[in-house]
Image (spheres, helix red, strand yellow):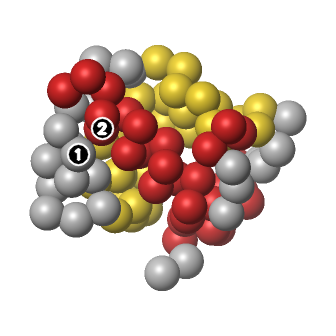
Amino acid sequence: MNTLLKIRVTPRSSKNEVRLDGDAVKVWVNASPTDGQANEAVIALLAKRLAIAKSRLTLVSGHTGRDKTVSVDGLGLEQILALLAQP
């Protein structure tokens, strides 16, 4: 089961953070978007928050934009949102 998760990323933030804003998932990373560093930081942060391996996350679209779609292997959307809602 692969679930597509749409996120909005803000690179060069003062801290790494994931927040739910209604149904929207917003991610802040302190990495620069240069050479895909922010994308790598987003995957690492999501993997940590979801308690899964980074290899189970794949950036499907939005490689160069702020709006991205990430495929999450093995978790449903409700599970993902519940895990991300935890502090």
Q: CA distance from mark 2 to mark 1?
A: 5 Å
Indicate left or right for 86 with 31 as reference: right
- Residue 83's tag is none
Tell me the kind of residue under disc 2.
Ala
Identified at 26% across, 22% down, the residue is 35
Identified at 23% across, 45% down, the residue is 31
Identified at 54% across, 20% down, the residue is 60
Could you say whether the residue bearing mark 2 is in a helix, strand or loop?
A: helix
Q: Residue 4: x, y in percent?
A: 63, 33
Query: What residue is pinned by disc 2?
Result: 38
Q: Quadrant of residue 65?
A: top left
Q: Quadrant of residue 17?
A: bottom left
Q: Residue 41: x, y in percent?
A: 38, 45
Identified at 82% across, 44% down, the residue is 74
Is residue 48 visible in this depiction of the protein? Answer: yes
Residue 74 or residue 30, whichever sits in front:
30
Q: Earlier in the sequence, mark 2 or mark 1?
A: 1
